[in-house]
């Protein structure tokens, strides 16, 4: 759980800096931080309430995307690293393009921008996974709440 807290806080701090660097994109960074924290917190809370040993142990009959995300170390690493790399490249681009790696039509593309373009689909996929986390955790909590209410009604 501590590793998740550190991950969330460090990326949120980076988002706060990015919101200052790119004021027109501040709402995006704020929404990203809110979705990231809410989805991970609710997922962790639902796992705890269900008595799971870890937030990474999921019901294998559940959502196939989350199943792949949590059962494949390669997928999990790629998603997390690609997402963090995207935010890091946005940070680096504030200071410059980085060393030129591609030249076409008189335009030289820097390394930071090239990496940003390469990892953008991964960042988008990671945000979709966060929304799936939020949705499935909300469904889990609703089912738990419904079962608790039914149990209380049955006992009274």
Image: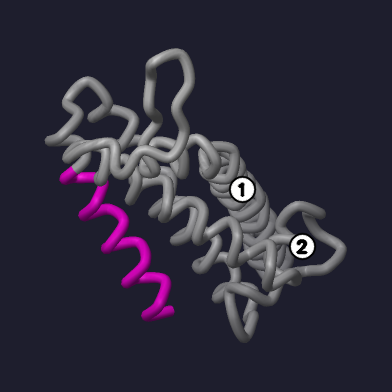
Q: Label 1 neighbourhood size at 10 Å, few (<14), some (14-19), many (20+)? A: some
Q: Is 54 situated above or below 30?
A: below
Colour theme:
one colour
Q: Residue at x 52, y 60 (%)?
A: 80
Of residue 1 and residue 75, the one placed in the foreground of this image is 75
Which labelled disc corresponds to residue 88? Answer: none
Q: Tell me residue 95's x, y (percent).
A: 17, 40
Q: Residue at x 61, y 42 (%)?
A: 125
Q: Residue at x 58, y 73 (%)?
A: 55
**Label 2 sits on residue:** 67
Label 2 to label 1: alpha-carbon separation: 11 Å
Magenta range:
1-17
Residues at discs 2 and 1 in contact (Cβ within 8 Å) = no
Q: Residue at x 57, y 65 (%)?
A: 46
Q: Secondary structure at mark 1?
A: helix
Q: Tell me residue 145's x, y (percent).
A: 61, 58
Q: Label 2 neighbourhood size at 10 Å, few (<14), some (14-19), many (20+)? A: some
């Amino acid at each position: 759980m501590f590793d998740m807290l550190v991950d969330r806080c460090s990326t949120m701090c980076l988002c706060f800096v990015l919101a200052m660097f790119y004021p027109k994109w501040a709402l995006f960074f704020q929404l990203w931080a809110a979705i990231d924290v809410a989805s991970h917190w609710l997922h962790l809370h639902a796992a705890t309430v269900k008595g799971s040993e870890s937030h990474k142990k999921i019901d294998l009959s559940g959502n196939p995307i989350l199943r792949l995300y949590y059962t494949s170390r390669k997928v999990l690493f790629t998603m997390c690293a690609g997402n963090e790399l995207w935010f890091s490249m946005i940070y680096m681009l504030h200071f410059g393009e980085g060393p030129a790696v591609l030249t076409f039509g008189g335009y030289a593309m820097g390394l930071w921008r090239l990496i940003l373009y390469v990892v953008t689909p991964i960042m988008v996929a990671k945000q979709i996974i966060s929304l799936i986390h939020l949705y499935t955790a909300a469904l889990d909590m609703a089912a738990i709440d419904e079962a608790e209410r039914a149990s209380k009604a049955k006992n009274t």
